[in-house]
Image (cartoon, rainbow, N blue to C red):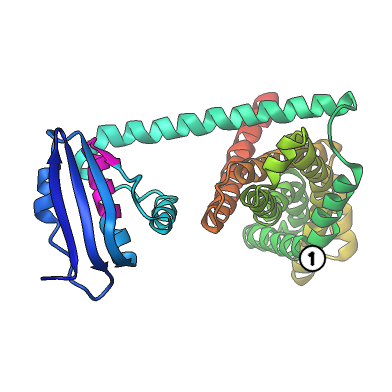
Amino acid sequence: MSETQWQLEQDGDKLVLRFAGSWLLGGTAPAAESLLARLDGSVAALVLDMSGVTHWDSLLASTVLRLQRHCEERGIRCDASRLPEGLTAMLALANAVPAEPAAREGLLGWGASILLVLRQVWLSATRALGFTGEVLLSLWRLLGRRAHCRARDFWFFVGQNGPAALGIISLVSVLAGVILAYLGAVQLKQFGAQVYVANLVSIGMTREMGALMAGIIMAGRTGAAYAAQLATMQANEEVDALNVMGINPVDFLVLPRLLALVLVLPLLTLYADVLGMVGGALIAGTMDIGLTQYIVQTQASISLQSLADGLWKSLVFAWLIAQAGCYCGLQSGRSSTDVGIATTRAVVSSLVAIIIADSLLNVLYDRLGI
């Protein structure tokens, strides 16, 4: 006879399963198939009795967990009130993270899968729109001096987003200017119009590339940082502590981050514009275009309107990046995996939002004749 034993007794519409013996790894557990077959619609409840168990380890825990999930799938109540305290805690830990659902693409079909995706998109959009409303209300409270927003937090994030990002902005902006100048020069050289490389670089950087490159960099750098910070606070229950103390997390955590990025990104865009033109000058110098001629042509091509176009884009990008990072962080779960997922979602959401917003703004500028 095996060391591990159980005995099944009928008690009306209930089944009482009595465990006995030593349930340790290395022993031979009774076959569960015949028992599972009896747990059908005719059984209302399964009662687990561990009074006869002398020793146990994870073998007993895995067996009980299998029985509980089998009963849950078939709508049978599983009475586990007689389990040892240690086993109850182990099962609670095992059930803390729900099991991944089995793949059901073949069962759902294409129509149901598309509806499921559309439902998830709709729910995400409504939650994001609700979060936007909370941010706007927070800004209104700030104007009325009723928001829990500290000035020192704002200036901390200004320093974190601004001076700390100049290195990567400088590198990418110069290279963007070099690429624009090189691509334009290859074509303009065929017509002897190399001097218009300056026009191409200056207009391209001020209207489009400066704001776009700065926004993409800050999405990967600052948006991810915002999401990771707030997701970690969510995991450590610091956000719950703010709620308990009566402090609005949007006022205290989101508002200083958003305002700091809205202030810094237009300045970084101007910085990127200048360095992009410097990168274009490096290429222009190799095409027999004098530095003075390049500067004069650049001054003639730049207008306040083109600068304003790029700065308006940077303001929109800053709002989208900050909101995506903070929203994904505050919506995160409480595990290290959830922190990573929130960071990934923040970066992807920011980049997609930037591209969509840039496309819509370009269409709007064209309709307005700007």
Q: Which residue is mark 1?
A: 167
Q: Position of residue 136 (x, y in %)?
A: 74, 27
Vertical comparison of 354 with 172: above or below? above
Q: Nearer the viewer, residue 204 or 172?
A: 172
Vertical comparison of 234 with 282: above or below? above
Q: Nearer the viewer, residue 354 or 78?
A: 78
Q: Quadrant of the C terminus?
A: top right
Q: Position of residue 58 (x, y in %)?
A: 33, 65
Residue 75 is a magenta residue: yes
Specify the amino acid type for callout 1: Gly
Find numbered disc 1 in the image and state the secondary structure of the residue it sits on.
helix
What segment is highlighted magenta in the picture?
A: 64-78
The chief SS type of the magenta part is helix
Q: Quadrant of the N terminus?
A: bottom left
Vertical comparison of 45 with 157: above or below? above
* Res 271 seen here: yes
Q: Position of residue 232 (x, y in %)?
A: 65, 53
Q: Residue at x 40, y 53 (%)?
A: 88
* Res 105 seen here: no
Residue 359 is a magenta residue: no
Q: How many marks?
A: 1
Q: Position of residue 328 (x, y in %)?
A: 60, 44
Q: Based on the displayed image, in which of its 4 quarters is residue 111 positioned?
A: top left
Q: Residue at x 43, y 34 (%)?
A: 120
Q: Nearer the viewer, residue 166 or 68?
A: 68
251 on left or right of 368: right
